[in-house]
Amino acid sequence: MEHRAAEIRAGLTHPVIDGDGHWMEPIPIFLEYLREAGGAGSVDQIRALWRRNQAWYRAAPSERQHNRLRRTIWWGVTSNTLDKATALLPALLNERLPELGIDFALIYPSFGLTINGIGPDDLRRAAARAYNMMTADMFAPFAARFAPVAILPARTPGEAISELEYAVGQRGF
């Protein structure tokens, strides 16, 4: 059965570019990359940070502000297994792009948007590096259809420049 998006795309004479495509990063894979980039201690640190962030739902607005609590991402919550898997797996997303009526997509992070909010410098830098390593590796086979963006920690110009040089110079972002 052809989906409406594919039907609309078939009637166009120009490419359709998704300028704000988000993927749902597979957390177990991210944690493997984080262990590589920052060591086992960084995995423990980020898990503790995530447990703390779950407190957002139990806190009053004033507590959220005072403690700088972050709300976890909510998009991507679905009971449709195929759609959830599509958001997690670049190969499946690549396979389904025609059905979605999309020719090319810029891919942005979901949970990765929180990386620049990580307080400890070493953990923030390791998490950004892990995200960039994982994203580059997972989307590399599909470079003709996706352009993922890199995470640049930007607490200082030096850390931003360092990760920019890595992401662009070594990983091709």
Image (cartoon, grey):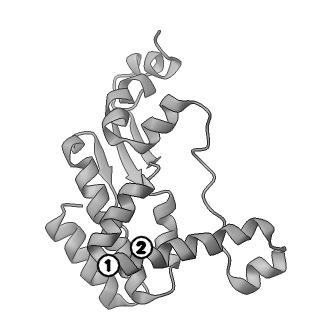
Give the numbered dot on residue 100.
Answer: none
**Residue at mark 2 to residue at mark 1: CA–CA distance:** 8 Å
At numbered mark 2, what does the secondary structure look like: helix, strand or loop?
helix
Asked if residue 4 is positioned above or below residue 21 in the image, the reply reads: above
Q: Is residue 172 left or right of residue 50?
A: left
Q: Residue, x 42% and y 52% (percent of image)? A: 26
Q: Is residue 85 left or right of residue 15?
A: right
Q: Position of residue 145 (x, y in %)?
A: 27, 39
Which residue position is annotated with label 1? 38
- Residue type (three-letter) at the residue carrying disc 2: Val
Do callouts 2 and 1 mark residues in contact (Cβ within 8 Å)? yes
**Label 2: which residue?**
43
Q: Residue at x 48, y 29 (%)?
A: 82
**Looking at the image, can residue 142 be seen?**
yes
Figure quadrant of residue 161: bottom left
Q: Quadrant of residue 130?
A: bottom left
Q: Mark 1 is on which residue type?
A: Gly
Check the image and name the residue furthest to the left: 170
Check the image and report above or below for 2 versus 54.
above
The residue depicted at 34 percent of the width and 23 percent of the height is: 13
